[in-house]
Amino acid sequence: MKEISLKSKIIVFISTIVIILSIMFVTKEENNSFSTVQNIIAKVYNPALKGFSFAGDKFMDLFSTIFASEKLRNENEALKLENNELKKNIAIYENLISNAKFLEEEKNLIANTKYKLKPSYIIAKDPSSYFLSFTIDKGKKDGVKAGDIVVIGKEIGNKQYIESLVGTVDTVGNSYSKVSAVINEDKGISFKTARTGAGGVLDGRVENGFSGNLFDEAADVKVGDKLLTSGTGGIFPRDIYIGDITEIIVENENIEKIIVESKVDFTNLYRVLILDKDEGDYE
């Protein structure tokens, strides 16, 4: 009700001003006797008119500011949405770029390997930032069994693609399997170097890799040598790529220990290949 009353007052006030002004302009030339009345009226209403004009100007300024602010807010919100969309697209493109090589290596491996590899997606993982253990979408109905080897494709130079060791299947359900990554297992991995065939066992774990010993402490090995599984022990088939030697620890002129880095990115796995352990070659 207060709002309606205020509007009514404003309407009456404005109407009065209009009527007075009309009378003043109409009668100005016809009757000079009105000039005194006009002066009186002007004196009475002039302050009010000035106040009304000032209030109107301020109202228009406020009106413009409000709508200008709203426009700026809308533009700002639109820019935020556009920025978020761009960030999302950049993340997608970066993911596609990073996965392009992975998919190329997988494709080329499948085309050239002697194994019947089963592609599988990772559907769950442990809480750590590394894929120390994870679940894949293949199980008994797909022919997967405990002990099967989990690999990815990896180029080791000159367009040569090879199975790179990821882990082993631990438990198997009907439509899923749980995998333990090799960097999380304490079991030894028998190896040989691709360059000289020098052998040994990796029985320690370091960040994203392994530590181990050579059978011959004076063997010919050097940093950068590639290690492959030897096939002994019956766990891992022969010639699965393990990683590269990054450090050789020497004591009394003998090789005390070697450090090996896996070339599998255990922080960014989403798809792996299952190798039937019964297809592998063992010594």
Image: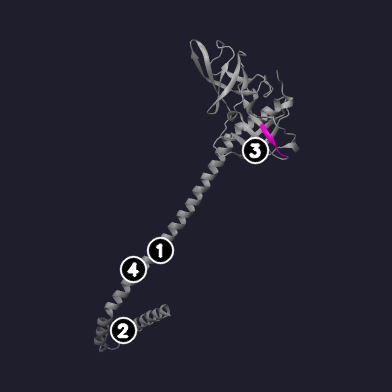
Magenta segment boundaries in residue numbering: 169-173
In the image, taking residue 51 as reference, residue 3 lies left or right, namely right
Number of numbered discs overlaid on the protein picture: 4
Q: Residue at x 37, y 66 (%)?
A: 62
Q: Are marks 1 and 3 in contact (CB under 8 Å)?
A: no
The quarter holding residue 268 reads top right
In the image, taking residue 130 as reference, residue 50 lies left or right, namely left
- CA gap between label 4 and label 3 equals 68 Å
- CA gap between label 4 and label 2 equals 27 Å
Colour mapping: one colour
Mark 4 or 2 closer to N-term? Answer: 2
In the image, taking residue 146 as reference, residue 43 lies left or right, namely left
- Find disc 3 in the rendering and name its residue: 135
- The image quadrant where one finds the C terminus is top right
Judge depth for marks 4 and 3 and give the one in front: 3
Q: Residue at x 41, y 60 (%)?
A: 69
The secondary structure that most of the magenta stretch takes on is strand
- Find disc 4 in the rendering and name its residue: 58
Indicate the secondary structure of the residue bearing disc 1. helix
Residue 282 rendering spot, x and y as whole percentages: 71, 20
Judge depth for marks 2 and 1 and give the one in front: 1
Mark 1 or 3 closer to N-term? Answer: 1
The quarter holding residue 21 reads bottom left
Mark 4 or 3 closer to N-term? Answer: 4
Residue type of the residue flagged with mark 4: Lys
- Find disc 1 in the rendering and name its residue: 66
Mark 2 or 1 closer to N-term? Answer: 2
Residue type of the residue flagged with mark 2: Met
Q: Are marks 2 and 3 in contact (CB under 8 Å)?
A: no
The dot on residue 24 is: 2
Q: Determine crowd level at label 1: few under 14, some 14-19, many 20+ residues with C-alpha closer than 10 A.
A: few
